[in-house]
Amino acid sequence: MSTGISRRGFIKAGVAAGLTTRIAGASTLKSKPDVIVIGTGLSGLNAASLLEEMGAKTLCLEARSRPGGRLFSHPTVTGNPEWGGDSILGGYARMQDTARRLGIKLIDHQGRRELSPEAHSDPKRVELALGGKLISRDEWPNHPLNAMPDGARNRFPGRGFFQGEIGKHNPLASFADWMKPQSAKYDRSAYEFFKELGWSDAAIELNYNTNVQYGTSAHDVSMLMWFFVQAWFKLQGDVARVAYKVDGGNQRFPETMANALEGDVHYNKQVVGIRSGKNEAEVHCHDGSVYKAGRVVCSMPIPTMRWVKFDPLLSPAKAKAIRTVQVQRITKVVMVPKKPFWEEDGLSPAMWTDTEAGEVRALREGEDSNAVTCLMAWGRGHLADRLDTYGDEVAMQRVLAAYEKLRPAAKGQLELAGIKSWQSDPFAGGDWAIWGPGQVTESLPALMEPAGRVHFCGEHTATSNRGMEGAMESGERAAFEVAKLLS
Ligand SMILES: Cc1cc2nc3c(=O)[nH]c(=O)nc-3n(C[C@H](O)[C@H](O)[C@H](O)COP(=O)(O)OP(=O)(O)OC[C@H]3O[C@@H](n4cnc5c(N)ncnc54)[C@H](O)[C@@H]3O)c2cc1C
């Protein structure tokens, strides 16, 4: 179900506000577009699509040979597990509306995704492994490695636990308040917040820094970001407890969006320079080609903008934000079981470990919603970097070995089906934006601001959503920003 107004309703609302009258003088020439959109991830595609609806002629330049950017589905493993963006949640109005408009079939995987560490029924249950050993639920409360905060010794460590604690102390009345000036006082480290709750360093190390989801440790993430994230995720579930995935893999989503564009999409066009002139903008590609248009929408992820020459130079605040805002580091390994070895040892195939296997999820994405189709090991933060240093083949073998060491029944029963390091991907440079202490207030607004004829979108410029819906939101904001100037 969609929760926001429909796309047509949105465009109409824009027109009523005088924003989106059909763009006057929009070029009909085949050769020169009104707007060049750099990047064909969800944000760039949504910007291009909306600009076309408002009458602009667009041209998309994409460095890869495919659209979708951080949406990338495994081509052969059953259920097309996602290397990148995975779940389309209840409040993703733009994603759901676009799916409906373009006839993209969404399947709700919520029942299969319930990997709550608190769940006690196989195969949703997650095993805990610390210090090289599996620890049973019965052993855990009195186990020597149990560093849970007082009153929580029977709780499973990690995000499920600490996000609940954040929820109890979240000062934001609404997730939308995170950008308000009065919220700036919370733009400090998550470490400070946990210490104020009375947590020991060991509790922070166990819960936050092990299998870290945002940043590399509690020191380098802003608590203001977490207050937003917690409230925003809660809202998603309150709207509808769903986790959609596209039939055939999420990559079908941007592919369908790209095919629906009227303007051309040029693939294998790596942008290396953007010049914003008095009357037009120029986009320079690695192969020497140069494109011109009245406006440019740049949807490139933060790290990849570090490798682009901007002329004139960007403002100090924007340049600083591009150089200093971090993105999450994630390396994933997919392993396909030859037989359900977990039936032999009576444990769940999913594990939360402090080994090189990181957090291992058991995906059930085939026709039979109970059958495990693959295991996906997530290495995050410094673990992702460490895996990358080994090279792909050795990294996969080490993840497999770490898993088999904990689970002898798995020996010889898992087939390696690929590895993906997002930080080693030259057209991503990492995953989602991580706001460090002070950066929500300083860097996020700077990343959004236009530079001459260049406008910016991408999930890192979203203020009301994260992930895929954030990317769509940002493309929409950039499209209206440009449309106002073209009309
Ligand atoms: C492991 C992982 C799990 C995730 N899970 C979820 C989830 O469950 N739910 C959710 O909502 N979101 C999730 N996300 C986030 C979501 O996938 C992203 O927020 C979203 O896809 C980003 O879209 P974007 O358009 O901002 O960026 P991108 O998709 O990265 O698009 C940017 C485009 O720019 C192109 N580009 C880069 N450099 C150049 C250049 N020099 N010249 C030309 N083109 C260039 C890229 O190739 C790319 O196509 C996840 C992401 C990852 C990686």
Image: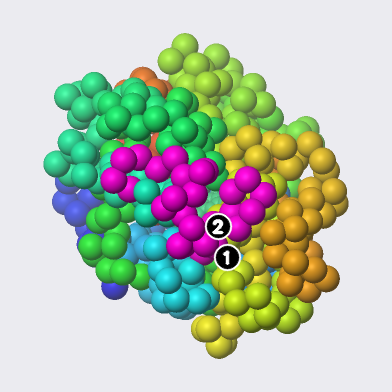
Image-based side of 320 in relation to 149, left or right: right
**Nearer to us in this view, 300 or 422:** 422
Other residues around mark 1 within 10 Å, as few (<14) / some (14–19) / many (≥20): many
Give me the residue at 58% from left, 18% from top: 311
How crowded pointer 2 is (Cα within 10 Å; few <14, some 14-19, many 20+) is rated as some
Specify whether tag 2 is near ligand 1 (CB below 8 Å).
Answer: no
The disc, 1 or 2, on the residue closer to the chain's N-terminal end is: 2
Name the residue that disc number 1 marks. 350
Q: Is the Cβ of the residue at disc 1 closer than 8 Å to that at disc 2?
A: no
Which of the labelled discs sits on residue 213, or is there none?
none
Residue at 52% from the left image edge and 43% from the top image edge: 145
- The amino acid at mark 2 is Ile
Q: Please count the marks in the image.
A: 2
Query: Residue beneath label 2, please?
Result: 135
Q: Position of residue 376 (x, y in %)?
A: 63, 62
Closer to the camera in the image, 80 or 98: 80
Q: Farthest bottom residue?
A: 368
* Circle nearer the viewer, 1 or 2: 2
The residue furthest top is 316
Residue that appears at 73% across and 54% down: 402
The answer to whether any part of residue 306 appears in the image is yes
Mark 1: which amino acid? Ala
Does the stretch in magenta take in 127? yes
Q: Main secondary structure of the magenta part?
A: loop
Magenta region: 126-152
Q: Position of residue 55 (x, y in %)?
A: 39, 53
Q: Nearer the viewer, residue 349 or 344?
A: 344
Considering the image in quadrants, where does the C terminus appear? Answer: top left
Left/right placement of residue 105 relative to residue 344 reads left
